[in-house]
Structure formats: structure tokens, C-alpha cells
Amino acid sequence: MHQPSNQPRPSIYYNYQVHQPWLASQHGPQQRQQVVIVGSGPAGMVLALELARHGVPSVILTSELQVSQGSRAIVFTRRSMEILQQVGVADRMTQHGLPWRFGNSFYRGQRVFRMEAPHDADDRFFPMLNIQQQYMEEYLLDACEASGLIELRWGNKVTHVAQENGYAVATVDTPEGEYQLESHWLVAADGGRSGIRSQMNLEMEGTSYEGFFVIADIKIDLPFPTERLAYFDPDWNRGNTILMHREPHGIWRVDYQLPPGETPEQALTVESLTTRINAQLDMIGFGGTPWELDWSSVYSARTLTLPDFVHGHVIFTGDAAHLLPIFGVRGANTAFQDAQSLGWHLAFVVKGLASEQLLRNHSNERVGAAREIIEEAGKSTRFMTPPEGGFTLLRNAVLSLSLTQEFVRPLYHWRTSRPHEYTHSMLNSMGDDNALFKAGPAHGAPPQNICLSADNYLLDHLGGGFDLLYFTEHDAVPQALCDVVQGVRQQGIPVRIVAVGSGQTVAGADTTLSDADGHFRQRYGVVASGAGYLLRPDQHVCARWLTLDAHRLQAAFDAALLRSHKA
Ligand SMILES: Cc1cc2nc3c(=O)[nH]c(=O)nc-3n(C[C@H](O)[C@H](O)[C@H](O)COP(=O)(O)OP(=O)(O)OC[C@H]3O[C@@H](n4cnc5c(N)ncnc54)[C@H](O)[C@@H]3O)c2cc1C
């Protein structure tokens, strides 16, 4: 019998709320569900919220009675905030988080590189925002509870998944024993150690790196701004790397690499932690400043992915689908993108708006994203924790040259998580003008935000279905385009026409956004009235035209819904 802990987890800064377990005996007979999601981490909850936006109910089964323990994700990217905005939690994140955009790399006591993440007036969100994962999960949880379409069952641990003809059966262990739950679709969002992945004997492709890092979260008052601090090869930890991040509530993360041969158990003794944290504080000039340990753990870098996320009626997402190193803040930030993508793909299949082939597209796109991240993360991981002679030589050469040679300094810069562009997606329209545009988001890219007026941005107006951005100087959307959109809507597919005009309300559009100074058109590479962009429900561009006509608009919808493909 599964007995999750009902003791609040210890934390200096976070008040854990313990929820009541969901017990089958207090409910009627179990009906077959459309969608069951295993796991209430960032992937599971964002997926449930995305499904709910499309009117699809879901049941989340989660083994614990509380949000996640200890120090996990703390850095969230702009794209993650744009996704969280869609599911209604971005405001709370920005209200409590610490925004930042600069990173500093130090070697031999000298700052040798200063990273500046791009940020312009059109961005609502900063490139990065620091806040502890528990808070993010709490905000998502509140949004799930506020949705009438999500049932969250605390203390429900899935111990086995079977697949029957056209549905999945989960065996769920609870404090009062087991019950079985059938669903048309079961989503394994059960994290990096996914029991469902193991039970199904699914192998991941990629690499596991040697070398351990300690994560220690300490409460300390340090007068540094919120910027990433990276120290290479310091005297107290020769050959290794230390990272520091400011978190809300007076917490700092100190993340240091262990010398080869040291075990995680040795590294996590109080004596070892104290000595090393004090050495780091001495090095940055704050030795003797009082501090208190909140959390410590050890991790090693892995770059692994399942080569396919869809297995019959079981779909893997988030860490259950791939394991990414935390350099470059990739885990949760990628999980949000997975969940956002899966949300609309699965909703359209559940609602019968598209064939199951659409899920194949989801898998192709997100496996492609994972492989791209693995490629990029591999480079930064090899720089941070060089696996063998040649890589160590290269890193040492970069470090020593960087003291005097400016040209090598950008090599310190490791790429942080960024949204994958579905450049070769089968949902992209082939007969459009994508290649003719000189600016603007291309096929498969997420949209560039635009500041329309004070506290009013383009992305505030998009999402939840397809969005047709129609750029016009006229006072009405052509009837032929409205007819195509109407035809698509009649099939149950949500589409909105967002007209971008010079001022007056555009008839036939659901919303008109003013672009009196032409800034929006310029960023989107629009040169004449009548241009358009079609955005998928996850906001990625699937078609764009310098001049849009009804025939090509219909073709774009057909491509995006795989109508020209056989199921
Ligand atoms: C030290 C550290 C630092 C990190 N820093 C960052 C960062 O700064 N930025 C970033 O983007 N990412 C970071 N990550 C990664 C991030 O924490 C994960 O990628 C993210 O939590 C993955 O979300 P998920 O929903 O896929 O899985 P998880 O968050 O692991 O959630 C899995 C869920 O499944 C539940 N579960 C598991 N098994 C079962 C079962 N059998 N039955 C029912 N429920 C089950 C769990 O209780 C949990 O609710 C960090 C991770 C660590 C460890």
C-alpha cells in the first residue's frame, strides 16, 4: 500500500502544504477517462491546463501529497514565461521572481566574460527569471484547482500501465490500496526516473557524463545583483567550476563540481559542505558572513532522450521523455514547451478534429527539439566538465588565453534554453511565401512579441487556437478569407482573426491591433497591405504570406491539420 509522507517537507523559506490523499472508496465507480496524466510536475500541470483551454478534461495522478522537494529549477526563460502566461500563471511568477539578463565568468580572480542576453522594448518578459520550483508548482496547482476540467488525485501512485485495444489501464496504489483507471490516452509525466518508462523497457539515446556537481541552497545576505556568476578553476577547487545564482527569499544557490573520485556521500557531509561553501565565500570576499543551509544534493549531467514519445496510447513528456543537463537551464524550460505542444496536438485528436497522425507530428517535433538541445548542451557540458584529455586541454587553453585575449572570451558562453523552431515541421505550409520574407518569425518559429502600448503586447492577444494575423490598411478583412475561416470554425477548430491595421477597427476581425507607426509590420517583414501569418495553437508560425488569398489560406489549414496526409 502506498503511504506518501504527510509531514511537511523541511524548508527555510517555503511553507509546504500537505494535501489529503484521493481515495477511490470516497468516489463512485471509475469511468474510462479521456486523458490521464501521471505526475504533477511542471510538465503534467501545464499539459492539463493546456488541455483544459481546449475544453478537454483530464485526471492528474500524483504519488506525493506536496509539491516538489528541495532545490530544483530556479531559472525560467522568457519563452517559458510566455507559455506560463497562456495558462494564467505568469503574473504571479513575475510578481515574486527576480528578473535578470547578465552573466559573469571569472578566472583567476578576473572577470573574463560578461554575457548579455538580448532584451528589447518589444519583450514583455526578461530573458531569465529566478524563482524556486516549489512556487512555480504552487501557482500551476492553483490554476489547475481553479479549472473545472482538471481533477488532481494526491497520493495516487501508478505502479503499472497496460495497453488494451485502444486504451491504457493504470494500476494506481493509494493509502487504502489499489484501483484501476482506464483512459484513452495516458501521459507519462512522471519525471526523470519514470517508472512507466522503465516498466515499458524503453531505451533512451544519448550520453551520461562523468563528474558530479553539488547543489547547495543557502540563506545568506550577499550584496550582488541578480546575475549569473561562474567561477572557473578557482584555487580552492582546482580544475573545477562553481556557479552562483540569487534566488528570492534571501537564498543563494552555490553549485560546485567535485574533484574526480569523490563520492556523493562524502560530498554531502556537513563538514565537506561547510568547508567548501566557506572557501567559495572567502574567494568572493564574503568569508565570515553568516549563512544557513537549506538544501543540498548531488547531480551529474545527462543528455538522453527517447527516440519516440508516443507508444500506442501512452505518451511521454517532460523529464520522463528526456534528461537534460541543468547547465543552460533546460529541464523545466523544455518541459513547458513539450507540454504546450502536446496540449493542442492531443486535444485536437481527442476532439476528433485531426487524426492520430497529429501525435506523430508532436513526437517528431519534440524529439527534434530534444536532440537539438542535447547537441547544444553537450558542448556546454564538455566545457564545464571536460570528459577527457582533449577537452581539458581545450578548456585550459581558453581559460588561460582569456586573461589577455579578448577573442576567446565568448567561448565561455554556453547557450541557455531557447525555443525550438519547427523549421521542417510537416504542419508548415509549402505554398506560402515563407522564403520571400526578409524579417519576422519564419516557419516553425514562435512569434516575436511586439509592444503595442503601455502594458499591452501582441502575445497578450494570441493563443488557445489558430491565430491569423492579417495586416491591412483597409477597414475590412476580405470576405473570401472570412469564408475560409468560417468553414474551418464550423468543423470545431478554434480560429481567431487578428487584424493589424493603421488605426481603425477592421470589420471581420475578432481583434484589431493598431500599428500606426508601422513598427509591427517592420518587425514582421510586412511590406504591403494584405500580408498574413498563420500561428498554430502553440503560437508557432505554420504559414506566412506577403499577399494572402483564400486558396492559400485553406491550403495552410489543410497542411496544419494534416488533411492532405493519410491517417
Ligand atoms: C538541482 C536541479 C536544478 C535544476 N535547475 C533547473 C533550472 O534552473 N531550470 C530548468 O528549466 N530546469 C531545472 N531543473 C530541471 C527541472 O527540475 C526538471 O526538468 C522538471 O522538474 C521536469 O518536470 P517534469 O514535470 O517533467 O518532472 P518532475 O518535476 O520530476 O515531476 C514528476 C512528477 O511525477 C510524479 N510521479 C513520479 N512517479 C510517479 C508515479 N509512479 N505515480 C504518480 N506520480 C508520480 C512526481 O511526484 C512529480 O509530481 C533542475 C533540476 C535539478 C535536480
Image: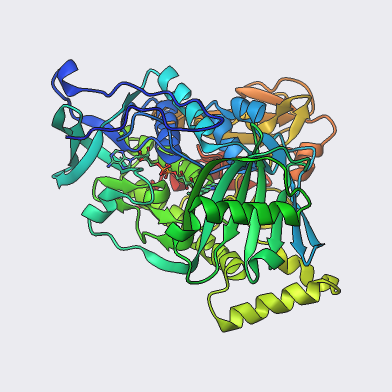
Query: Where is 27 relative to 170, above or below?
Result: above
Nearer to the camera, 177 or 203? 177
The tally of labels here is 0
Residue 453 location, quadrant: top right
Residue 163 percent location from the top left of the image: 16, 46
Residue at the image point whose x is 64% and y is 63% from the top = 241
- Residues 477 and 465: in front is 465
Residue 499 appears anywhere in the view: yes
Residue at (76%, 32%) from the top-left corner? 451
x and y, in percent, of residue 89 in the image: 55, 27
**Quick check: 43 left or right of 450?**
left
On screen, residue 406 above or below 43: below
Image height of 496 relative to 192, above or below: above
Q: Is residue 157 left or right of residue 274?
A: left
The quadrant the N terminus occupies is top left
Q: Residue at image x 56%, y 48%?
A: 216
Q: Position of residue 18 (x, y in %)?
A: 38, 24
Q: Is residue 489 left or right of residue 63?
A: right
* Residue 78 drawn at (x, y percent): 64, 41
On the question of residue 473 being in view, the answer is no
- Residue placed most toward the observer, 435 or 454: 454
- Looking at the picture, does residue 126 appear above or below residue 66? below
What's the colour scheme?
rainbow
Q: Quadrant of ligand 1?
A: top left
Q: In screen coordinates, is 95 left or right of 159?
A: right
The residue depicted at 68 percent of the width and 40 percent of the height is 290
